[in-house]
Image (cartoon, helix red, strand yellow):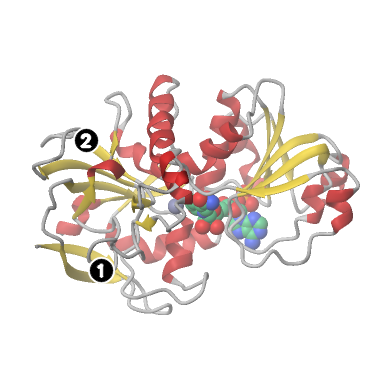
Amino acid sequence: MSQAKAYAATSATTPLAPFTFERRTLREDDVNIDILYCGVCHSDIHTVESDWGPSEYPVVPGHEIIGKVTAVGNKVSQYKIGDIVGVGCMVDSCQHCAHCAADLEQYCDNGAVGTYGGHDLIDSTLTYGGYSDHIVVREKFVLSIPETLELSKAAPLLCAGITTYSPLRHNGIKAGDKVGVLGMGGLGHMGVKFAKAFGAEVTIFTRSESKIAEAKRQGADHVIVSTDEAQMKAAAMTFDYLLDTIPVQHDLNPYLSVLKVDGTHILVGLIEPVEPPVHAGNLVMKRRILTGSLIGGIAETQEMLNFCAEHNIECDAEMINIQDINEAYQRMKKGDVKYRFIIDMKSLKD
Ligand code: NDP
Ligand code: ZN
């Protein structure tokens, strides 16, 4: 066992605060990683605040982890001490169901183990995430970080990156497709970059007029202010795909109306339940598809990291100290982040 320093929430209503706990002793297929950077995902806030039903506390959030390997178990073959590696949203899965066999561990029939808030498959202990100085992870769930990626900006690729890359790939987004990205936050801004890299014509839907110039700088071809009814009406029946990253309940009906016949609305924002109700006519009358997507498998996450290295795709990040995490959450809830907070874990030593 090794003692870890971290920040944790001990209830849905208390701010995150310093916390120490024991990481497990390295198993033969485990990698010990000293954490350099950890991105701040809106899922961290949802979990800390028990938005998805009661969370198990303490919650040590963080599933966008970049770090350096400092020890390996004796059966580890892919990584060695000194390697720069990443860990995303899951740290284990059964490895024998059909989905694990198909490199879709996130859809493991027996439940993938979350990087935080999950239960270890061997000893059942609660998993603690990346707002900590080190983490112990099964080799199979560790990603290799290409050398050319700027390390201080790579962490968000492990969740925001793969969660937008995977559905765009799965749906076969290609040159000429008209893609709308709903919400310009951590996921949304990565969705724009990937959709552009795949050749699509990309529109950002934002509530924030102030993000118009920024969205274009990021490569979006067009911007629609979603609170402006006239702009929404003018866009009726013009999109092939929508990638919906909005983290709160919102009316899907006006968005469905901008899809063409056979258009697809992909939910990645985890809103429970969808409210107000979707009008069946918005789907039936135009054969539209409403679907969802959960992160991506480990092989696809590695593919995405390599794709980012090849295409110079990186996150737009604002570096913070761990001591600023509660303020960062408040700013994210207001949509005030450009476009991902990354915690410099050196600050945990302060
Ligand atoms: P962020 O907070 O970074 O961004 C969300 C964006 O949505 C905001 O910047 C804002 O954009 C828009 N938004 C926020 N509040 C509202 C509102 N009340 N009405 C309309 N738009 C709003 O969140 P993330 O990108 O980190 O996460 C987005 C969602 O995706 C979360 O629910 C998260 O849990 C989920 N998620 C899902 C995953 C999956 O596997 N499916 C994985 C990771 C995250 P603007 O100002 O431009 O309107
Ligand atoms: Zn996330």
Quadrant of residue 203 within the rendered picture: top right
| Lateral position of residue 254 relative to residue 86, left or right | right
Q: Are marks 1 and 2 in contact (CB under 8 Å)?
A: no
Vertical relation: 271 (above or below) 225: below
Q: Please indicate, yes or no, whether residue 336 appears anywhere in the rendered image.
A: no
Q: Please indicate, yes or no, whether residue 28 appears anywhere in the rendered image.
A: yes
Residue wearing tag 2:
84
Cβ of mark 1 under 8 Å from ligand 2: the answer is no
Residues packed near mark 1 inside 10 Å, few (<14), some (14 to 19) or many (20 plus): few
Residue that appears at 14% across and 57% down? 349
Quadrant of residue 169 within the rendered picture: top right
106 or 1, nearer to the observer = 106
Residues packed near mark 2 inside 10 Å, few (<14), some (14 to 19) or many (20 plus): many
Q: Please tell me whether mark 2 sits on a helix, a strand or a loop.
A: strand
Residue that appears at 35% across and 42% down? 155
Q: Amino acid at mark 1?
A: Thr
Residue wearing tag 1:
125
Residue that appears at 59% across and 46% down? 184
x, y (%) of residue 30?
17, 48
- All told, the count of numbered labels is 2
Q: Amino acid at mark 2?
A: Ile
The residues tagged by marks 1 and 2 sit, at their Cα atoms, a distance apart of 26 Å
Q: Please tell me whether mark 1 sits on a helix, a strand or a loop.
A: loop
132 or 330, nearer to the observer = 132
x, y (%) of residue 273?
66, 67
Q: Quadrant of ligand 1?
A: bottom right
- Earlier in the chain: of badge 1 and badge 2, it is 2
